[in-house]
Amino acid sequence: MIGTETKTQTIQETKAPPGLLRRMLAQRQGKIGVVLAGVVVLVAFLGPVLMTLITGYTSTEFVGRPFQHDGVFGTDNLGRDILSRFLDGGLQLVIYAALATLLGMALGAAAGMLAAYQGGWLDGIIMRGNDVLLAIPQLVFALLAITVLGPQGWVLVVVIGITHAPRIARVARSATLAVITEDYVAAAQMYAVPRWKILLREVLPNITGPLMVELGLRMTYSIGAIASLSFLGLGLQPPTADWGLMINENRIALIIQPWGVVLPVLAIAVLTVGTNLITDSLARASAHLNVKDTK
Amino acid sequence: MSELTESDPRPDTAAGAGAKMFGSPGTVALRADGLKITSTAGKEILHGVSFNLVAGKIRGLVGESGSGKTTAGLACMGHFRAGLLNTGGSVALYRDGEVLEVLSLNDAGQRKLRGGSISYVPQDPSLSLNPAMRVGEQIMEVLRIHRPEDSERDRRGRITEVLAEVGLRNDKAYQRRYPHQLSGGQQQRIGIAMAFACRPAVMILDEPTTGLDVTTQAMVLKTIGELTRRHAVASLYITHDLAVVAELADDVTVMLRGDVVEDGPAKQVLYSPQHAYTRRLIRAVPDLAGRHRIGEVNAVTGAHPIVTAAGPIVDAAHPIVDAAGTGPGAPQGPASGSEPVSGTRAGERAGRHALPVPHDAAPATDNLLNATGIRLNYGPAQVLDGVDLHLGVGESLMLLGESGSGKTTLARCLAGLNDRYQGNVSLSGTQLQPGARQRSITERQRIQYVFQSPFSSLNPRRTIGESVAVPLQMAGQDSGRQQRAKVLEVLDQVKLGAGYIDRRPGELSGGERQRAAIARALVNAPSVLVCDEVTSALDVSVQAAIIDLLRTLQVETGMAMLFVTHNIALARHISQRMAVLQKGRIVDVGPTDDVLDHPQSDYTRELITNVPTL
Amino acid sequence: MMRLIGRRLLISILILFLVSILVFVATLLLPGDPARAILGQQATPERLAALREQMGLTDPVWLRYLHWFGGLFVGDLGTSTSAGAPVTEVIGARIGNSLVLMVIAAVIAVPVGLVVGTYSALRRGKATDHVFTGISLVLAALPEFVVGIILITLFSTTVFAILPSVTMAAPGHPVWEVPSQLVLPILTLVLVVTPYMVRMMRATMIEVLDSGWVEMARLKGVPERQVIMRHAVPHALGTVAQVIAMQLAWLAGGIVVVEFLFRYPGVGAAMVDAVTNRDVQVVQALSLLIAGVYVVVNLLADVVGIVTNPKLRREESR
């Protein structure tokens, strides 16, 4: 009689949950986010290739007097074609932001997982180091680094990546702490599975949810931070075409020639809103995946 | 134990005699009729549940997880959890000669009833008491709401009174404590005091003794019984535990997946059940006396064989169990000598009960696992205080202990999961290193450990096949193909079958997961299986099936088993010998019958007295 | 409880100390010679040597650190190379201006964030909730200068030209003499900081409203208003205090961009100028100052957390 237990419960079984990404895309705001971010990334990648085909000018070519209404969107503060500069101005931003995010993820996730798994003095050192880095606001830290090392691309990537790391480490650490109390980690210990394998196979797959959310969040911040630094004149340097820089260069003429500001502002806004929508959808999707499996 | 001493200021019956009473004993106080509840997703949870509650009587509402018993209980108060909708039925409250339709009242009307005429005692007081409010204040809150006419002083008096009624200290200092400063049993009594403060006509008690020790549980049950009868409260006691119902309830309602399948006086429902489900449920309840079988398994000590004495030391490289019949070493012990281990199960089962019953199976010579002087402390807390334990070949030993006794810690020390102990653990005469990593591959394979919760012991991201294969991979002796063959074999052994190999834990029920976890422990053919509370997270019918499985496996493979549990009622169903652990010390040890019939320690005696029985 | 708070205080001091080392060491990495940077390429070796001696550049590193660190306590933050004046003189007047921005922004943002978040949680799944959630999601994504530019476009140029887009206080006059020029910078800060508070307050409130004790309170017949104010909100505040602190501390960094955008005479704008001019001493001083604000605000949040939690558990926030 009791043997029927297996059968009746098989009927009630739940379907295997679809992957995180698919569940993110199943949400309307997830789809909107992917479309928004996708369009801007597409512009950023195709723009440099297409700009001369569309406008006939490169982004650094002087085509007329400043702030005129020639061409589609007119000219900028030095008389360069705004559309060309716009099309050419996103690629470095997107790539630097992605590199900075990945660097931060790699450093932060490794440090956080290690701190949680090893515990003890290593945990103490990593977390105190985190506190010190966290005490300096991200932008201030970046400014400090730029003062010392100068406004170069790799400096931006490294400094933004490093300032992300402690924030990601915190998340990775607390997610790992929740996972390593699970018995399947104890079971792996009992079977003497090598420690790196435990981290890679038992822990990492079970903290992908929070890490993916963090990835999205940090990507949004990276874009904002790099664009902000360029806007301050401390990121990408003239005469490079860059959205943040364009806003800085053209904002004095906001009234007479708004396109030089409006186009890059729109692009940055749409991109960050897109990544944030993706992040939020990821968070919703992972909330159901990484919560402790209880009855 | 401290619970007992704190019941001192309990007043005599006269204290409550002057209080006003709703309804007289014997009249119906609440009638739930055809309750239907549907989830917002459209799935019906309750399909028309009816019962009534009578003043001065306790109705047990029994069901396994997913039966909808808590949902039905909360519906009596007009409360539906998020995502649930009431789609039919009525709840009538009979009070002072008038009838109140609870479900048709507006919010304010229902609020007036809740905590006043109908009160609720939650399942887990540690979650249900506000952690940031002093306990006295939490009781006061109810009184302020439902007794606005009383003076503050009257209310203070009532708090003092009701705390005494539930057997707690009632001085000012105690009232100023926060919930986290109380033990689980004390928190639960605060919950009861809060529910009882306004002298309700109806009390809904939702598994209020889950997680409490049997001694504390017995105290709380006694309090509930007394309060109900003395003040003619109509109580609904929601539980999965039939033994508790047998102790406490006058009437019983049995629920199965949103339906009432049986309803009647407790004696009738429990001792001559009509519905097949009730019968099955009752059959699955383990009892201390071991009079009947749970699942397919007879009470062990009465009529069950022991695999013992000359059973072979299992060599990890040569698993003795092989469903295909190709395994090299079938055990040659007396128990299995009369029949082939790899024979059909039906034949084996038929033959099993006919086998002779050996007696005490612990001659010191055939000790397989020997632990001596195990000590472990976390700071000043002495968790294990010099434990000696031995386990013979093929023997089944129960390690009994309540929460905080150190039983899980001990089990983990033996399995090498906890390496911080002092003392000696030896296997077949060889001393073992404390940590599993320091032990040899063979030693690791020979002692296997099954975790308490199958919801935690399997990685949700890996398939059952991958998880079960981990011990084989770490042994490194088999090719991938051989590993898969062994995994399939062992899945068959735990009655899951090949279809489960590529599934993930999320697709499995609790019982199925626990079988998979057992399969992982079996795949290297251990000589000792340590089972740590392996059934405590499972429903009673699933528990019976798992117990059955473990006994069958033990007979088939000849392995020894250490069965760690808090549930003394399982003793005669699983073990030949038992050891009772209290505060890190073994206070009783011996053949199961001897310990249960002639306990040596007061502690064991108290456990046996307090355990509820059917 | 006092011990816990004392411990937090000690940790904060330790962190500030380590930050000071970090800031100091960072500037050691600076390539080139500060003395030459001040005097220019044409300087004679004698003058360079003299200035190095004067600036203490010939001392060992640890001595220079101690000198600098000791100077912090007596208000000697070094000399600004670009202004040729003591750092305290360069940034002193600006600290007040920045504080005005931060404090007003905080005073507006915190209550708005808490109230909107709570309201959103109580109306979970309803239209108003969706509107608030959507707006906060979009605003939270935008970098502060984008928010600022949009505000300028809307309120001071193209659409409504009603508010000044830059700060035009005469030197020597306090910025608040012309209140209208404070509106856009403050609004920008509020719009950037509030969405996180709304989102966290909403999420935390939803969690608390689903808790066992809130259900129990309802089952005790406690009126809904009291359930929220007495049983739910206090718990949410303990958690949200951390987020509020992080956001307020973020203000300390966020003012850099906002002040630059609105040409507001505060420490943020000074920071950008200093970085542009590679004015090391000023950057050092401002980094430390901003880190100080950050640490103090975080300390306060922890104290709030400790005080509101009767369990006084071991600190979990770190």
Image (cartoon, coloured by chain):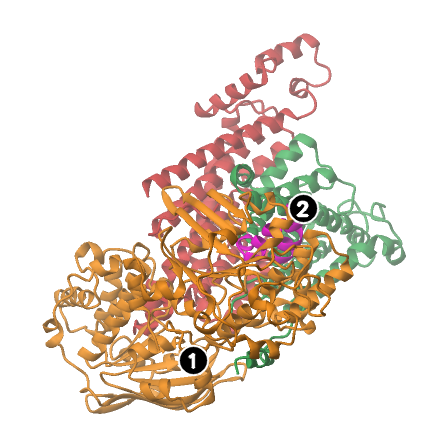
Residue C205 is marked as none
* Secondary element at tag 1: loop
Can see residue C167? no
* Secondary element at tag 2: helix
Q: Residues within 10 Å of mark 2 (few under 14, many from 20)?
A: some
Label 2 belongs to which residue?
A106
Q: The chain shown in green is which?
A: A
Count of labels in the image: 2
Q: Which is in the foreground here, disc 2 or disc 1?
A: 1
Residue positioned 27% across, 64% down in the render: B138
Per the rendered image, the range of residues in magenta is A178-206
Colour used to depict chain C in the structure image = red
Decide if residue B400 is on the left or right side of residue B542.
Answer: left
Can see residue A57? yes
**Is A248 included in the stretch rendered in magenta?**
no
Place of residue C196 in the rendered image (x, y in percent of width and height, measured from the top left): 52, 56
Label 1 belongs to which residue?
B63
| Main secondary-structure element of the magenta-colored stretch | helix
Q: Could you tell me the amino acid type at mark 2? A: Ala
Colour used to depict chain B in the structure image = orange
Q: Mark 1 belongs to which subunit?
A: B
- Hey, which residue is sitting farthest top in the picture? C46
Q: Could you tell me the amino acid type at mark 1? A: Gly
Task: Please state, as top left, top right, bottom left or bottom right, where the C terminus of chain B lies in the image.
Answer: bottom left
